Each structure stands twice: as C-alpha cells, then as structure tokens.
Amino acid sequence: EVSKLPFEFFKKSIFSRGGKFGAYGAPEDVKAVEDKTENGVRTLSVKWNTFTPGGSTLAKRSIVTAQTAGPDLYMLVVTSSANRYKTAEPTLRQVASSLGTARDGRAAKEEEVGGLRKRM
C-alpha cells in the first residue's frame, strides 16, 4: 500500500545522487511540506535545493504523485523553481493529478537497458 511507504523511500528514489535530479550532486534540504493519501493515490509536496553545472544552489518545489497497480508503483514528478511555484502550483497540481493506473492482468514488458532490466 502506497500510504505505508516512508518518505525516505521517495527521497532516495527521486532526490538522491542517482535519482532524477542528481546530475550535479545529490539535492539538499529535501523536506516534505505536505503528504496525503486519498483513494489509493499519494501526493507529496516537496521543497529542496539542487545544484547547477556552475555549482550554484537553486531552490525547487515538486509535487510527487504515487499510485500502485498490482505489485508495481508508478510515480509522476512535476517540478518548478521555488520563485515561480506560487504561480505554477495550480498547473502543477492539475498535471500531478492526471496520473492514473489500472491493472489489466497482463505482465509488464521487460526490456534490458544498459544491462539493467526495466519494466515498461
């Protein structure tokens, strides 16, 4: 169940050196501002800092939507700079709420990408 996953799971999966935003170093000061689950869909509001190629720090805000379909977990992450978050938030929330999953009884296709199995 998605509501039982600790915030650290999301932090490690998305906001680590190997995650989506770790190209120039692991994001810092990753904090959940909001964490709620409704109808099996978990929504997290996260604030964090990332690094630019020049080494500067940028404040960011993200909305993470997570939902399970059978044994699989699907996540959708939408992000904005902290400066633009207030004006972008309605659009980000609309996009984040668009995640929908359904179990159709078929196993996910697996393909090998760079020596790793990836379920599509």
Image (tube, grey):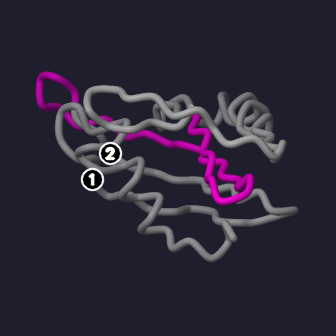
Residue under the image location 55 percent in, 29 percent down:
84
Residue under the image location 50 percent in, 42 percent down:
61
Residue under the image location 46 percent in, 31 percent down:
81
Specify whether residue 65 is painted magenta.
Answer: yes
Q: Residue extending furthest left?
A: 54
Magenta stretch, overall SS: strand
Residue under the image location 51 percent in, 63 percent down:
32
Q: Quadrant of residue 53?
A: top left
Task: Report the amino acid beneath label 1.
Answer: Glu
Identify the disc placed on residue 28. Answer: 1
**In the rendering, at what x and y percent does residue 30 appear?**
38, 57
Label 1: few (<14), some (14–19) or many (≥20) C-alpha neighbours in 10 Å:
some
Task: Report the amino acid beneath label 2.
Answer: Asn
Q: Residue extending furthest right?
A: 39
Q: Quadrant of the N terminus?
A: bottom right
Q: Secondary structure at mark 1?
A: strand
Q: Is residue 88 left or right of residue 99?
A: left
| Residues under numbered marks 1 and 2 in contact, where contact means CB atoms less than 8 Å apart | yes
Look at mark 2 in the image and give the residue it sits on: 49
Q: Is residue 84 left or right of residue 37?
A: left
The numbered mark, 1 or 2, whose residue comes first in the sequence reads 1
Question: Against 25, is 13 above or below?
Answer: below
Q: Is residue 113 left or right of residue 7?
A: left
Viewer-proximal residue, 56 or 106? 106
**In the rendering, at what x and y percent does residue 104 appear?**
84, 42
**In the rendering, at what x and y percent does residue 28 appear?**
27, 53
Residue range corresponding to the magenta coloring = 52-78
